[in-house]
Image: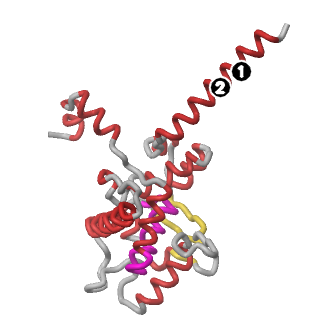
Amino acid sequence: MTVEDTMINQTEAQKTIQANEVQHLTESELMDVLECARKTSRRDHSLILTMYWHGLRNQEVARLRLSDIDFASCLLTVQRQKSSLKTTQPLVKMKGHPAKCELTALKTWLKERGEQVSQYVFTSNRDGSCLGQKQINRLFAKYCTMASQVRKERGDNPIAESAWHAHALKHTRGTLLAEKGASLLAIKLVLGHKSAQSSERYLHATQKTAWIEAMKLDTDFAMTRFLNKCMP
């Protein structure tokens, strides 16, 4: 049965459940994942940061080569998959925020990595081979588990298990940019999409932002009606 057949055969209830599943992290959840990774593994921390800041897919970060990083110019070049753009974007520098500083994380990991035959940036600790997509998903799920435990201990909700996959980082990047007011064009370029339609699927309005926007519209409408009544 094809994916299309599966979608057609879904009940309305199943479609609703799927639509309501969380596919991205909140900013707080992202920070908890990054902190857990930073305290555990330099490789994993820099990998997660690189995926998040540049909205990379599993296979894109897995195939990232040393030659794709230009530390002199602080640039990262990525040949994206699925007919997306080839992008060259700045490496993120955030002085005073080590959990979010991509440039420092990459330099620290590559120093630890040392000289290897492999030209890939993120390699297996076991034999120096290129990381696989399933490995990347497993390590991301591990940090979501660790972060969820940290969150529960301080009284916060754990991360939804539907977001325990590395592609959630791309969704998270797009969603957080949208919540902060970035244009669809800016989001498209950051995520490396050729069309704006490709970017729209990564925008997940939260209940909070939806409510704020709805209330603003209600308030503006009420104020307009009031002014119309008052003005001659």
Q: Quadrant of the N terminus?
A: top left
Q: Residue at x 52, y 35 (%)?
A: 210
Is residue 39 positioned above or below 17 on the image?
below
Q: Is residue 59 visible?
A: no
Residue 113 pos. (x, y %): 41, 88
Q: What residue is at 33 percent from the left and 52 percent from the top?
A: 160
Q: How is the image coloured?
A: secondary structure
Q: Report the magenta residues as a range.
A: 38-56
For the residue pair 62 and 36, the one nearer the viewer reads as 36
Relative height, residue 50 to residue 179 (above, below)? below
Question: Percent from the top left, x then y, of residue 22?
Answer: 36, 46
Quadrant of the frame with the C terminus: top right
Type of residue at label 2?
A: Thr
Q: Is residue 133 above or below residue 17?
A: below
Q: CA distance from mark 1 to mark 2?
A: 6 Å
Q: Quadrant of residue 139?
A: bottom left
Q: Position of residue 72 (x, y in %)?
A: 63, 81
User: Which secondary structure class fits the magenta region best?
Assistant: helix
> Which of these two is toward me, 88 or 231?
231
Q: Which residue is mark 1?
A: 223
Q: Badge 2 is on which residue?
A: 219
Q: For mark 1, give the secondary structure.
A: helix
* Residue 48, magenta (yes or no): yes
Please state the horizontal and vertical placement of residue 37, each as a whole percent of the image: 40, 73
Q: Residues within 10 Å of mark 2 (few under 14, many from 20)?
A: few
Q: Which mark is residue 153?
A: none
Q: Residue at x 27, y 69 (%)?
A: 135
The single residue placed furthest to the top in the displayed view is 232
Three-letter code for the amino acid on which mark 1 is drawn:
Met
